[in-house]
Amino acid sequence: MQGCLQSSHTTLVNFTSNEMLNISGGGQASIQAQDGTFNTITIALDDPTVGFDKLQFNLDATANGFADFTAIDQFGNVFNFNNIALSGNGQNFFTLGSLDGQVAVSFTLVSTVGISLISELDQVRLGPATTTPVPAPAGLALMGLGLLGLGMVRRKAA
């Protein structure tokens, strides 16, 4: 499923799951599984050069249990937040923030076996941020060889 940011209708957000997803709304959109419950969902912006430095959402669970969250930053670092308690009252507000210029490029929620009864993902808010390009290993090697060559030229000249 795909949506957009309220602040930028051209910035697209992808929501993927192992379930068919529906969106219901009216004001704050709600993402729901077609069969009523889901146990995994991934959120990522459609443009791979854009990530988010803040993510807020509310999980509507119909039973107490636990969930695991995974975020991946622009450098490919994986951040796991495991055994996060979920309340069956439906008010499970979470905020993912970044430090030191990190930008998340994807976020995944996976519920444990004990809580496959998440009925909705509500009030999703993203703070988009441009990702910092990461030099390819070949580019770094080429730059290193260039610096080494400059050092050798300077040594011969001296």
Image: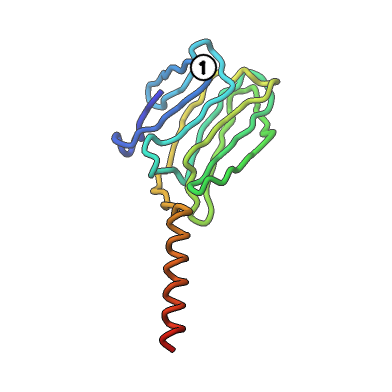
In-image side of 84 versus 128 (left or right):
right
Count the marks: how many?
1
Question: What residue is disc 1 on?
Answer: 19
**Residue 26 pos. (x, y %):** 37, 21
Is 31 placed above or below 34 here?
A: below
Is 25 placed above or below 143 here?
A: above
Q: Amino acid at mark 1?
A: Glu
Residue at the limit of the structure toward the front, as seen here: 156
Residue at the limit of the structure toward the left, as seen here: 10
In-image side of 88 versus 13 (left or right):
right
**Residue 146 pos. (x, y %):** 42, 68
Q: Secondary structure at mark 1?
A: loop
In-image side of 140 versus 5 (left or right):
right
**Residue 124 pos. (x, y %):** 46, 32
Return the residue nearer the eye: 21 or 151.
151
Residue at the limit of the structure toward the bottom, as seen here: 158
Residue at the (44%, 89%) spot, across then down: 158
